[in-house]
Amino acid sequence: MPAAPPAAPDTTTDVVLVVDFGAQYAQLIARRVREARVYSEIVPSTMPVAEMLARNPRAIILSGGPSSVYAEGAPSLDRSLFEAGVPVFGMCYGFQIMATTLGGTVDDNGAREYGRTPLTVSKAGSTLFEGTPTEQSVWMSHGDACSAAPEGFTVTASTDVVPVAAFENDEKKLYGVQYHPEVMHSTYGQQVLEHFLYRGAGIEPTWTTTNVVEEQVALIREQVGDKRAICGLSGGVDSAVAAALVQKAIGSQLTCVYVDHGLMRKGETEQVEKDFVAATGAKLKVVDAEKRFLDALAGVSDPEQKRKIIGREFIRVFEQAQLEILQEDGPEVAFLVQGTLYPDVVESGGGTGTANIKSHHNVGGLPEDIEFQLVEPLRQLFKDEVRMVGQELGLPEEIVQRQPFPGPGLGIRIVGDVTKERLDLLREADAIAREELTAAGLDRDIWQCPVVLLADVRSVGVQGDGRTYGHPIVLRPVSSEDAMTADWSRLPYETLAKISTRITNEVADVNRVVLDVTSKPPGTIEWE
Ligand code: XMP
């Protein structure tokens, strides 16, 4: 293989850095900043200040964190951060660290506040609070409290028990609040954050998904040059949007591969084969591998075994397709497109997006290992932003708004072994549930709604004049933020009744529909 092509260059966009002090709030803050149309990225609090400043941030936000500023080993911050002339906004722990570093007083005076708390703004018209009411509700989560602001700061808000709940220093462009403006329970939180960005830091709200598309198209062109790229489509949002972006950038130098494993929901393969191609003009290679997957899954009912088999077959089929593309005439195939998102990047500790991926082949005639460089145009984006980019690129609504769906597909929604007949039956039931949820306008209220076939269970029923002995279908609608935890969705009875009636009437062999009312934990979202 020749020398690796250049890595994806960094973006040139103005950036606001969110310093992560280890709470779960940093990603939310970064999203809120972007909702204010200002680009933001998360950096760990262990990053040296010089390195943060070297990024030329337009502003820096210090997130909340779980520690007391006085706890042993609590994250600290070099004072030079506050002396660089870069506007800084501290929130919760970030506020306290700002206070102590600059000579204010933070102590444990027993003034703990958790949850919704009334805040009194003492300086109406301040940079942060202008245009917001004197009394407002904010979300607190702290033990220690600030009792004296550092010199040069004006105290702009307090609560019943905390004398200094916000302070501002317009001259030095340093601001802080004890509460969490990023959570929706802080009624004017977004406004306060925007005041910091626009008024405090003087940043113009210009970051949009249109900019993202233009910027990424230019970067992809630069990275790929005149070589070729491959992108695997799964039917999901991320791979579709990544492929559409790369297609816009390099056109026919991209070949997309879709492995039809026969485990998709009704209409989804057609969405990729027809609608995606129509919307993007992408070159698509579809591999019909249904029989291969079903043969490999025959007689297997253990969920982990199913996952392993599906994963293994998928890689084999995909690599065979890659090989065929490599053998086609044309420039070198050097890139693999992946729909990696920003939360994955943050959670895996950052990185620069230059990793290579090796493909191992056991088919003769070509190098043993083929090394691809990754193109990851969504590495800076959150899921909702990916959907917006997809919309911008004209992808069909069904693809852009698609709810999460597991890679192993319906294979892990049949409790029992997987057969073509069972898949067809489940596909029908799932399509009815989806149709009725959409008709009731509930798509945005639920995170996802697995429809599960209990193929190993039969129960007695009566239909027409006869006794039946059919299978139950389980509806598993859940609401969730990130699939880590979930609650069962309280769907209207009328919608549930419609789904139940239609499934038992229209799907042969199903004589019962049951609703899963278990949260996660203890239940997982999927049944397998
Ligand atoms: P659980 O069932 O663990 O699901 O609560 C959490 C989220 O992950 C999805 N899921 C999968 N996604 N391959 C995937 O790509 C899998 O094997 C898999 N299992 C579960 C599930 O749909 C939910 O969104």
Image (cartoon, rainbow, N blue to C red):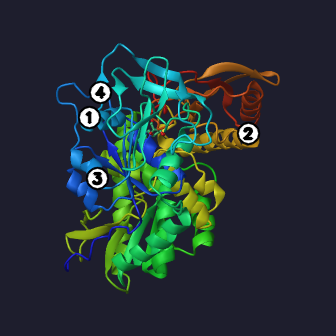
- Residue under the point 22% across and 75% down: 4
Q: Residue at x 32, y 42 (%)?
A: 20
Distance (Cα) linking label 1 and label 3: 33 Å
In the figure, is residue 445 to the left or right of 181? right
Instruction: Describe the element under mark 4 as helix, strand or loop.
Output: strand
Residue at the spot of label 4? 105
**Amino acid type assigned to the residue bearing label 3 in the image:** Gly
Identity of the amino acid at label 2?
Glu
Secondary structure beneath label 2: helix
Question: What separation in Å lies between label 1 and label 4 (alpha carbons)?
Answer: 7 Å
Q: Is mark 3 within 8 Å of ligand 1?
A: no
Q: Earlier in the sequence, mark 1 or mark 3?
A: 1
Viewer-side label of 4, 2: 4
Q: Which of disc 2 and disc 4 is earlier in sequence? A: 4
Q: Mark 3 — residue?
A: 350
Q: Nearer the viewer, mark 1 or mark 2?
A: 1
Q: Earlier in the sequence, mark 1 or mark 2?
A: 1
Q: Are marks 1 and 4 in contact (CB under 8 Å)?
A: no
Q: Which is more N-terminal, label 3 or label 4?
A: 4
Give the residue type that dot 1 points to.
Gly
Please name which of the two marks, 4 or 3, marks the residue nearer to the observer.
Answer: 4
Query: Residue at label 1?
Result: 103
Q: In this picture, is 270 found above or below 68? A: below
Residue behind mark 2: 436
Residue 285 visible within the image: no
Instruction: Residue at 29%, 69% (x, y): give it.
Output: 373
Image side of residue 162 versus residue 206, left or right: left
